[in-house]
Structures are given as structure tokens and as C-alpha cells.
Amino acid sequence: MDCGVWVAQWMIREHLEILFQHVNNATRMRLAVDLVTKSYNELAEDAVAKAFRHWQRIAI
């Protein structure tokens, strides 16, 4: 299984493994941001550009 898929499944199923989890939501968000924005993601530039445009649009 691809590690990104495994991580996504882990993030989705967190409520099922409550007894074994010691990870907070900030850690999950940091992991998600890293998966989207790091250089190993071929779509990183596009995702960041779209996020920036969205942020500019809602900040007005």
C-alpha cells in the first residue's frame, strides 16, 4: 500500500483507535499539509497557488 494512502486511512479512522492514539489534531493537520505541499507531490505548486488565491478571495 502506498504510504500516503496509509496515512490518509489512519487520519480518517482515528476515532476507531482512540485507545491507541496519542496524536492530536494539530499533528494530523501538519501531516496533511506536508503531504500536499512538499516537493514529492507533483501537484504541490498548483495546490499552494489555489490555496493562496482562495485565501485572497475570502480575506477581502
Image (cartoon, rainbow, N blue to C red):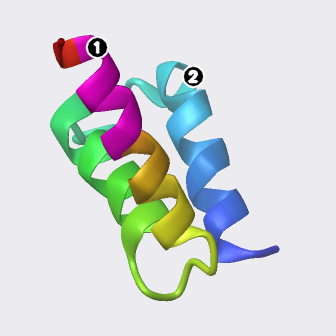
Residue for point 82% across, 74% down: 1
User: Label 2's element?
Assistant: helix
| Magenta-tinted stretch | 52-58
CB within 8 Å, label 1 to label 2? no
Task: Please identify the quarter of the rendering in which residue 49 is found.
Answer: bottom left
Task: First in sequence, mark 1 or 2: give its number.
Answer: 2
Per the rendering, the mark at residue 58 is 1
Q: In this rendering, is residue 53 above or below 40? A: above
**Secondary structure under the numbered disc 1 in the rendered image:** helix
Task: Name the residue nearer the viewer: 60 or 45.
Answer: 60
Picture coordinates of residue 6, whole percent (x, y): 66, 60
Of 49 and 26, which appears nearest the observer?
Answer: 49
Marks 1 and 2, Cα distance to the nearest angstrom?
35 Å
Q: Is residue 4 left or right of residue 24?
A: right
Indicate the amino acid at tag 1: Ile
Classify 10 Å Cα crowding around label 2: few (below 14), some (14-19), many (20 and above): few
Dot label at residue 16: 2
Amino acid on which disc 2 is placed: Leu
Given residues 58 and 34, the one toward you in this image is 58
Residue at the image position 59 percent from the left and 31 percent from the top: 12
